[in-house]
Image (spheres, helix red, strand yellow):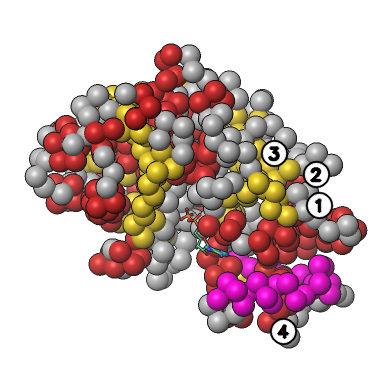
Amino acid sequence: MMDDRTFLGLDLSTQQLKAAVCNDRLEIVYEEAVTFETDLPEFRTQGGALIDKVDSRNVKAPVLMWVKALDILMDRLTVAGVDFSKIASVSGTAQQHGSVYWQNGANETLRNLKPSEFLHSQLAHCFSLANSPIWMDASTTKQCKQLEDAVGGPTKLAEITGSRAYERFTGSQIAKIHQTKPDSYKVTERISLISSFLCSLFLGKVAPIDFSDGSGMNLMDIHTKKWDETLLNACAPNLAEKLGEPVPSYSNVGSISNYYVERYNFNPNCRVIAHTGDNPASLIGMKLNEGWVAVSLGTSDTLFLWLTEPKVVVDGHVLCNPVDENSYMALLCFKNGSLTRERIRNTCADGSWDIFNQLLESTPRGNFGNLGLYYDIQEIIPFLQGDYRYNKAGNVCKFTSLEVEVRACIEGQCLRNRAYAEDFGFQVDKNTKILATGGASQNKAILQVMADVFNAPVYVQEAANSAVFGSAYQAKHGLLYENSKTYSEITKTVPEPILACVPYKDAAEIYDPMVERYKNVIRELTKK
Ligand code: ADP
Ligand code: XUL
């Protein structure tokens, strides 16, 4: 019944839990989503996050909200008519870096889930921390220093793990939990990433962390793909046993928990494939290969490239590649993405993307020499917070019209993307092609600015949410990997990207100098 089989992919992102079911040709047959803020208002999150009112650097999310979201999502898929007995394998992805703390006895509870009850009622007492730190957290500067010192500085840490210490990365987050909540740490039997936590819910036991998401922790040696003992010891005691051994991202990690067989009529032979981070999953969903730059415009804005060799960089990250064990991927992440665009849309365009786009399109490229930088929350690179506005003469100013503000926001974000990609060693040339994904990639006016700033064509895929589709493709790849089916063979039926916009002729003339100007402004603002 090969023609009949389907693959389930999930994406536990910042704002939503999404699911996609694909057929054997990897065409999407069902899509459903649960939105945390509106579907689960009892958890009182802002877009899925709990931002501390006293110190906004502390950002968490309730673990049980994610579990409850899965209960609701499974019900929605049932109502939509999904035949679970046809699903051959499941894989998933999640926001990167966040960590979940399983309390002593949790693995036993996971192994004995009662099919007649919801997951959230059975797992209510399984977590030693009710709220998990997530990627938006920036509260671990002290622990970052400790990790870098343990191996001889930021560059050395970047050489080993692919990144210098970053506040949101899991190592410093675990160290902080151990230092500030020693009792909770003591009763923790296992620690999962959010991706491997989601995988555990399908597997019915704590699932392994995969190489790609594991390389976003500042704990794994990206060359040997093993935990670095010095770093584990610098973080917290007995960490190796709490993390378990990492595995390749496409690993077939076991059969689906009996809970799903009895409750939803899954086939007992349905396999669970390791889950990974959302950026690695997007790389899969976009069928990214060399020569393309992927730009994901989601809650965070990220930029990623396929790398054949690991590079050592201090601004940016090198992660293990999720489909090819010998390759890597470069990643840049900016926290102030969609939520910042939404703030400017709300203050300038009455909350409407249509009005926002009209304003954006009514201003000339280059914005009369105005430049704006908007960091609603503590940015990663550059390490800044607040709004900065400059006029043509380079003086700090206020913008006098709504359209200038809207264009300044989008141009500022696109200049940032190009400037940091260049610092990573990426050079725009006539072969550069950009592939856009994420919620805001459906906005052509924004993509046009991206095309102009990079002076390169921008493409999109028919399926805009590449992370969730990437995990459905990975479900198939992981299932057939043992039969020597390569990832490119498996995804050859996925349609090629579609051209969305091309740059105007004067793009380089306008934006090349603006990129340099942007870099100078940042240099001044971040001068110690
Ligand atoms: P994540 O996976 O990080 O939770 P998504 O990739 O689903 O996020 O993107 C969600 C974001 O997409 C929303 O916060 C919203 O601002 C943005 N978005 C949706 N539609 C548009 C649009 N037409 N123009 C610009 N942004 C949009
Ligand atoms: C990547 C990062 C974010 C999250 C949430 O380093 O922090 O992109 O994965 O999407």
Q: Is residue 228 above or below residue 453?
A: above
- State the residue position of label 1: 455
The part of the chain drawn in magenta is 352-377
Q: Quadrant of the N terminus?
A: top left
Q: CA distance from mark 1 to mark 3?
A: 14 Å
Residue in view at x 81 percent, y 67 percent:
365
- State the residue position of label 2: 428
The quarter of the picture where residue 509 lies is bottom right
Please tell me whether mark 1 sits on a helix, a strand or a loop. loop
Residue in view at x 35 percent, y 65 percent:
37
Q: CB atoms at circles 1 and 2 under 8 Å apart?
A: yes
Mark 4 crowdedness (10 Å alpha carbons): few <14, some 14-19, many ≥20: few
- State the residue position of label 3: 292
| Three-letter code for the amino acid on which mark 1 is drawn | Asn
Q: CA distance from mark 3 to mark 4?
A: 36 Å
Give the left or right position of residue 244, taking residue 157 as reference.
Answer: left
Q: CA distance from mark 4 to mark 1?
A: 27 Å
Q: Is mark 4 within 8 Å of ligand 1?
A: no
The quarter of the picture where residue 101 lies is top left
- Residue 505, position as x, y percentages in the image: 88, 57
Q: Residue furthest bottom?
A: 400
- Residue 97, position as x, y percentages in the image: 45, 44
| Three-letter code for the amino acid on which mark 4 is drawn | Ser
Task: Looking at the image, tell me whether mark 3 or mark 4 is earlier in sequence order.
Answer: 3
- Residue 496, position as x, y percentages in the image: 62, 38
- State the residue position of label 4: 401
Per the rendering, the mark at residue 198 is none
Please tell me whether mark 4 sits on a helix, a strand or a loop. loop
| Three-letter code for the amino acid on which mark 3 is drawn | Trp
Q: Quadrant of the C terminus?
A: bottom right
